[in-house]
Image (tube, rainbow, N blue to C red):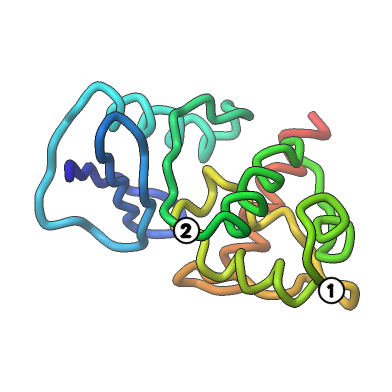
Amino acid sequence: MSQLSLHSPLGPLTLSEDEGAIVALDWGWGRDQSETPLLVRARDMLERYFDGEAENFDLPLAPFGTAYRQRVWSALRDIPYGSTTNYKKLAEIAGGSARSIGGAMATNPIPILIPCHRVLGSRGLGGYSGEGGLDDKEFLLGLEQQRHEA
């Protein structure tokens, strides 16, 4: 598995590639660094995203998970940049309950690229599994909202 790290406003992030697809985005700096064409493209897209330029991540993604989690993660990718939805509405699309949606999102191996930060709870932000928790979620939502309104 190849990895490439980048600096971001959320701290260091590491992308992982396996068999021609992104399989993970983790907080922290990876030990081994490989500049594959896909990892460089993904890193560059993320850097533009954090600069407020890129809106869509057109990348091959292959997160490992159950069939249900795959459905949830696919539905997450359909939430437009700068928009949000809630757990209940996502459950209507992907199946299951708001609670099962939260469980699938908590195990999302490719956050940001699979935008689980765009899902809100019925009483506020909900949770976020990024290293900075809700601070990271608020930052990502603010970044997208600022760009979306421009």
**Alpha carbon of mark 1 to alpha carbon of mark 2: how far?**
27 Å
What element does badge 1 sit on? loop
Q: Quadrant of the C terminus?
A: top right
- Identity, as a three-letter code, of the amino acid under mark 2: Gly
Give the residue at mark 2: 65
The image quadrant of residue 147 is top right
Residue 2 percent location from the top left of the image? 17, 41
- Identity, as a three-letter code, of the amino acid under mark 1: Gly
For label 2, count other residues whose C-alpha is less than 10 Å away and answer few (under 14), some (14-19) or many (20+): some
Asked if 46 appears above or below 5 in the picture, the reply is: above
Asked if 3 appears above or below 108 in the picture, the reply is: above
* Residue depicted at 57% across the width and 27% down the height: 54
Q: Which mark is residue 106?
A: none
Dots 1, 2 in contact, CB < 8 A: no
* Residue depicted at 76% across the width and 36% down the height: 80
Q: Quadrant of the N terminus?
A: top left
First in residue order: circle 1 vs circle 2: 2
The image quadrant of residue 20 is top left
- Residue with the most extreme front position: 67
Residue 135 percent location from the top left of the image? 60, 70
Residue 58 percent location from the top left of the image? 53, 25
* Residue depicted at 59% across the width and 34% down the height: 52
